[in-house]
Image (cartoon, rainbow, N blue to C red):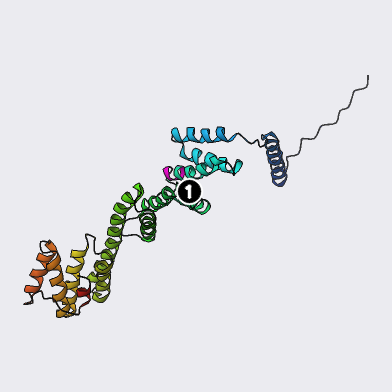
């Protein structure tokens, strides 16, 4: 019997690195295509069902889900009465999520589309407090603080008798105090550097623009201090006199008076000074 001769089967060649990458890429494309094929077709839902789902998300504290679902109400049913309410609720939900930029954008859009709506005052207020809650420490840039002040003033000026105006007025005082604090921080820095003219200009800003804030007594004291350092005695006497007249019990006046008398100078009001036009 003749033997059967079998040829040896060569080993399967190992694909090169380039081929392996091609195979992997092809597999990925096939997988993505399969996923796309499995996606459910878009189906418009009843407006009340969508809105109630958004409310459920809000009640659960899922503010991002609520905001996105309120947005979907408007997208699917833009001309329904629910859409208008959903817009302001989306802004509120973004605010609750601390997504302040999204809340401001949603409030602005509501105001553009519905300037005469009954919720307009609330939209202005929501925008204002979204800025207000982003106010940074006085050591940082205060651009957002100024935007908060402008937005809060909008609420008070447009809706002076509203419930939102009362809270806005309180926040305006706090915001102005914050802005004055920033000017004081910069002024003190200039003063420590011996740049007394620059320091005086910052302190003057506090006295002129933020007269109702808690920083004014210190600003007047430091104006006196810098004028004395420059040898401008008349202005030093005048700022000290204004400080003593308006804040006689202030610790800043006690320090100012001691500083002047230590140099054989007394507080004295001068006519025609820039301070005489303010106080």
Asked whether residue 94 is drawn in magenta, I would say yes
Q: Residue at x 23, y 75 (%)?
A: 196
Q: Residue at x 47, y 46 (%)?
A: 91
Q: The C terminus lies in which quarter of the figure?
A: bottom left
Is residue 271 toward the left or the right of residue 104 in the image?
A: left
Quarter occupied by the N terminus: top right
Near-viewer residue (114 or 188): 114
For residue 201, what is the image quadrant?
A: bottom left
Range drawn in magenta: 93-97
Residue 236 lies in the magenta-colored region: no
Residue 181 as seen in the image, left or right of residue 152: left
What secondary structure is found at the residue carrying circle 1?
A: loop
Residue 136 point in image, percent of width and height:
34, 55
> Above or below — where is 224 with respect to 143?
below
The structure residue drawn at horizontal position 51% and vertical position 36%, both measured from the top left corner, is 54
Q: Residue furthest top?
A: 1
x, y percent for residue 82: 54, 40
> How would you rate the neighbour count of disc 1 (Cα within 10 Å): few for under 14, some for 14-19, many for 20 or more?
few
User: In terms of secondary structure, what is the magenta stretch mainly?
Assistant: helix
Taking depth in this image into account, of 32 and 92 the one nearest to the observer is 92
* Above or below: residue 109 compared with residue 97: below
Q: How many numbered tags mark residues here?
A: 1
Residue 271 image point, x, y percent: 16, 79
Q: Where residue 179 sits: x, y (%)?
A: 30, 61
* Residue at mark 1: 117
Judge from the rendering whether residue 22 lies leftward or rightward of residue 64; answer left or right.
Answer: right
Q: Is residue 26 above or below residue 132?
A: above
Q: Nearer the viewer, residue 128 or 8?
A: 128
């Amino acid at each position: 019997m003749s033997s059967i001769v079998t040829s040896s089967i060569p080993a399967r060649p190992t694909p090169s690195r380039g081929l392996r990458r091609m195979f992997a890429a092809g597999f990925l494309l096939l997988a993505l295509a399969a996923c796309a094929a499995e996606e459910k077709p878009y189906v418009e839902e009843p407006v009340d069902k969508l809105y109630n789902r958004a409310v459920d998300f809000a009640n659960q504290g899922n503010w991002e889900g609520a905001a996105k679902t309120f947005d979907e109400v408007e997208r699917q049913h833009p001309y329904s009465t629910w859409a208008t309410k959903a817009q302001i609720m989306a802004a509120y939900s973004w605010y609750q999520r601390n997504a302040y930029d999204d809340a401001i954008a949603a409030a602005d859009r509501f105001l553009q589309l519905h300037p005469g709506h009954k919720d307009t005052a609330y939209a202005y207020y929501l925008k204002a407090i979204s800025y207000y809650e982003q106010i940074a420490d006085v050591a940082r840039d205060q651009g957002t603080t100024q935007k908060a002040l402008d937005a809060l003033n909008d609420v008070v000026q447009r809706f002076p008798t509203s419930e939102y105006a009362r809270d806005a007025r309180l926040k305006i005082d706090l915001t102005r105090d914050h802005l004055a604090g920033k000017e004081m921080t910069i002024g003190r820095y200039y003063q420590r550097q011996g740049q007394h003219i620059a320091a005086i200009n910052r302190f003057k800003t506090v006295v002129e623009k933020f007269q109702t804030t808690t920083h004014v007594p210190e600003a007047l004291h430091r104006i006196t201090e810098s004028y004395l350092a420059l040898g401008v005695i008349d202005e030093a006497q005048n700022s000290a006199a204004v400080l003593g007249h308006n804040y006689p019990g202030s610790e800043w006046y006690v320090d100012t008076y001691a500083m002047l008398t230590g140099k054989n100078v007394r507080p004295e009001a001068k006519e025609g000074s820039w301070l005489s036009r303010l106080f």
